[in-house]
Image (spheres, rainbow, N blue to C red):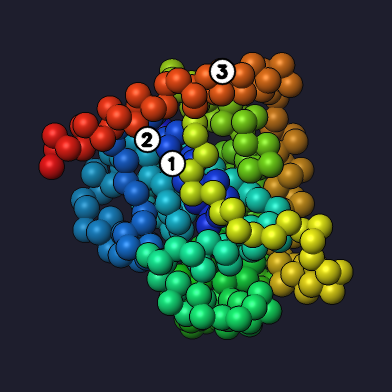
Amino acid sequence: MPRQVLFEHIPKTAGSTLHFILMRQYRETFYVNKNLNPLDSFEEFYTFPPEKQKSFPLIHGHASLILEPLLEKPFCFTFFREPVEQLLSQYHYIRRAQHHVSHSVVSKLHSLDDYLHYARDHYQDNLHTRVLARDTSWITGQNGPPSPSMDQLLESALMKLEALDLVLLTSQFDASVLMLKEALGWEKNPYYVRMNVTHEKPELRTLSPSTKAQLEEFVRHDRHLYDHARKLFNEQQQVSEEEVLRFQQRNRFFRRWIFPFYRLQVKLRNEQIE
């Protein structure tokens, strides 16, 4: 029997695009994202009997690793993104996403510097580290007793990183999804259209040296974790450049010619359900 798959979606690490891919691979899933508050999803999951908890072929979403102890050796993976890019994308996404729980506050902030103060006060710094360490303070906005230090969280995150079945990178997205296809035995090719792309974030080269230094300090623990993640990815990566180029060519055909019909099919199916 195939292992359950558990995808930990660290915010703004191409998770929406991967969600599109996963929905084409798995019919039955448990999605941790109720009203953008994972804790609501956890409460629902805890009400299920153990046999149902273990019956979902796929469990995915923000902070989903918290559910791992309830499962039997699931196949766990996540994507990592360059930490400063992730931080900037998160900031600009929250500013424009009216449904986000932090939008009403963040949209009124006057600058990136204001956001950094807000994010630190609400435990939104070093999100890669916090998520892998199963820290929930970034969800609740407050530390619970006992309050681990960031150094302690990093130590836990590094241990979890080593235990993941696959460590993937957004900067190598196409190679990463091909690695997933091989590891999980997908019959369908993981063609995709990019989803939930944040367009407003400034490019790193336009930022001043002092701003870059401030951002680097803000994600200091994530930088350490990310460097280890890249090392593991390079050790695991066995997809050839030719395979990636061939996949990209076919994916361009999918985006242009197949996806419009797929989207129409999904729309018609949803209308029938309603």
Helix, strand or loop status at disc 1 = helix
Residue 23: which numbered mark, if any?
A: 2
Residue 240 place in picture, x, y as percent? 72, 20
Residue 19: which numbered mark, if any?
A: 1
Q: Is residue 219 left or right of residue 100?
A: right
- Pick whichever, 200 or 83, lies toward us: 200
Q: Is residue 150 left or right of residue 93?
A: right
Q: Which marked residue is nearer to the observer: mark 1 or mark 3?
A: 3
Helix, strand or loop status at disc 2 = helix
Residue 133 place in picture, x, y as percent? 57, 62
Q: CA distance from mark 2 to mark 1?
A: 6 Å
Q: State the image quarter where residue 112 is shown.
A: bottom right
- The numbered mark, 2 or 3, whose residue comes first in the sequence reads 2
- Pick whichever, 140 or 242, lies toward us: 242
Q: Residue at x 60, y 58 (%)?
A: 200
183 is higher (above) or lower (below) than 200: above
Q: State the image quarter where residue 177 is shown.
A: top right
In this view, which residue lies farthest toward the right? 209
